[in-house]
Image: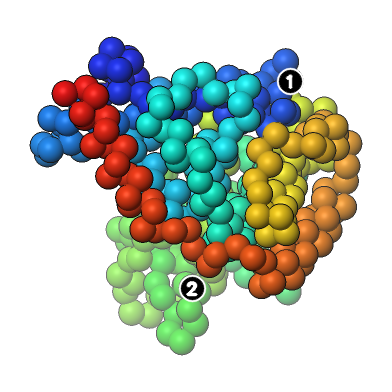
């Protein structure tokens, strides 16, 4: 099912501008994000082919099937609540049946963790970008030999350097474990058919050989397998990030020189502010009154450590306000279920 299918069959019952336009934080570089709700046709609903969500390739436009929308609403999912309580000037389409949902308040104490927890994932994203910027990785991937060292004097040298200095080829070498010494190996060389330190260039582990009795090692070698595994994981994540990153946002990060994803940090502060407001007032203000301050964060005008400090202060206040809030512990599940049934029946009756 495609977005065009939803439109052709008149299945959409709610549609709005979301993201920065709803928050009042849009700039000239902001994408136009659209979210909405649709109802499966009665035949498809009764059949096997269920669809929870329909989106475009970039996920800039997303529509939730009514049941999925209500399920997420029951969990006080931030994206769903922001969609439901979108500012009036962002609403592009609203079926009369959907109005009964908009007229209800589904906020609960679940918002402490749904909004607050989501905010902290943005902190982790910002920290992750900070690490990637400060620790760029060469495109040329390291191999097992780069994590192998032989003892030399009171220290060690890379095995590749040791072999080159002694005009030895790694493929003519053999390795044997040293008892009671994890990750330590005897390094041997000779005319015997050894398997090499590694069997092939792209190997992910060292090779072990059968060593004849009485043969002495030319050196003691260690393989830091843990460091190699960590490197491989970081290398994969880094270059996947390079491939998928938003170049404008990345350039903005470089330009402001603070080495964090300013947009993620802006949304962190926004989400934490919203969570605190919900706990204190029982209301969700999607359109942000602190637009200029949030945009200053997005421009990278604040220090990363100061923003983390502010985030922690907001978390402390959130933890104080929710235990004394008048909000229910969870949304009214009976009401959500009643509305789900009523809207679906009403929609099928109108379109039968």
For mark 1, give the secondary structure: loop
Identify the mark at residue 183; answer none if there is no mark. 2
Badge 2 crowding class, 10 Å Cα cut-off, few under 14, some 14 to 19, many 20 or more, is some
Measuring 67% from the left and 66% from the top, which residue is drawn there?
Answer: 325
In the rendered image, the vertical position of residue 332 relative to residue 244, given as above or below:
below
| Coloration mode | rainbow
Q: Which is more N-terminal, label 1 or label 2? A: 1
Q: Position of residue 347 (x, y in %)?
A: 27, 30
In the rendered image, the vertical position of residue 106 relative to residue 150, given as above or below:
above
Question: In the rendered image, which quarter is residue 198 located in?
Answer: bottom left
In the rendered image, the vertical position of residue 184 relative to residue 299, given as above or below:
below
Point out the image quarter for the N terminus. Answer: top left
Foreground residue among 124 and 274: 274
Q: Are circles 2 and 1 on residues that touch, CB within 8 Å?
A: no
For mark 2, give the secondary structure: loop
Does residue 223 appear to the left or right of 338 in the view shown? right
Measuring 50% from the left and 74% from the top, which residue is drawn there?
Answer: 184
Identify the mark at residue 27; answer none if there is no mark. 1
Closer to the eye: label 2 or 1 = 1
Q: Label 2 vs label 1: CA separation? A: 55 Å
Measuring 44% from the left and 38% from the top, which residue is drawn there?
Answer: 100
Q: Position of residue 167 (x, y in %)?
A: 55, 49
Question: In the rendered image, which quarter is residue 310 located in?
Answer: bottom right
Foreground residue among 153 and 41: 41
Q: Is residue 167 visible?
A: no
Q: Position of residue 232 (x, y in %)?
A: 50, 50
Badge 1 crowding class, 10 Å Cα cut-off, few under 14, some 14 to 19, many 20 or more, is few
Foreground residue among 303 and 193: 303
Identify the mark at residue 254; answer none if there is no mark. none
Q: Is residue 286 visible?
A: yes
Tell which residue pokes out farthest to the bottom in this image: 180
């Amino acid at each position: 099912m495609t977005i065009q299918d939803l439109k052709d069959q008149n299945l959409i019952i709610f549609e709005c501008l979301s993201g920065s336009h709803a928050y009042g934080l849009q700039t000239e570089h902001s994408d136009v994000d659209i979210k909405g709700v649709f109802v499966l046709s009665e035949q498809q609903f009764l059949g096997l082919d269920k669809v929870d969500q329909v989106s475009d390739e970039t996920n800039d436009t997303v529509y939730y099937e009514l049941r999925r929308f209500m399920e997420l609403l029951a969990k006080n999912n931030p994206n769903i609540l922001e969609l439901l309580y979108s500012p009036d000037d962002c609403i592009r389409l609203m079926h009369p049946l959907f109005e009964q949902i908009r007229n209800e308040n589904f906020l609960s104490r679940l918002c402490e963790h749904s909004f607050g927890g989501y905010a902290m994932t943005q902190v982790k994203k910002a920290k992750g970008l900070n690490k990637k910027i400060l620790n760029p990785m060469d495109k040329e991937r390291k191999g097992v030999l780069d994590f192998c060292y032989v003892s030399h004097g009171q220290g060690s040298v890379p095995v590749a350097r040791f072999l080159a200095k002694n005009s030895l080829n790694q493929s003519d070498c053999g390795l044997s474990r040293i008892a009671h010494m994890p990750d330590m190996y005897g390094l041997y060389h000779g005319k015997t058919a050894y398997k090499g330190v590694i069997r092939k260039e792209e190997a992910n582990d060292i090779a072990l050989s059968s060593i004849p009795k009485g043969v002495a090692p030319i050196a003691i070698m260690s393989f830091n397998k843990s460091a190699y595994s960590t490197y491989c994981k970081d290398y994969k994540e880094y270059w996947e990030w390079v491939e998928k990153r938003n170049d404008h946002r990345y350039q903005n990060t470089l330009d402001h020189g603070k080495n964090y994803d300013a947009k993620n940090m802006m949304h962190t502060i926004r989400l934490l502010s919203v969570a605190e407001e919900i706990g204190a007032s029982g209301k969700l203000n999607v359109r942000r009154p602190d637009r200029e301050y949030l945009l200053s964060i997005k421009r990278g005008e604040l220090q990363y450590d100061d923003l983390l400090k502010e985030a922690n202060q907001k978390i402390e206040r959130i933890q104080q306000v929710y235990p004394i809030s008048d909000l229910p512990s969870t949304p009214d599940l009976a009401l959500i279920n009643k509305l789900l049934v009523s809207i679906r029946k009403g929609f099928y009756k109108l379109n039968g």
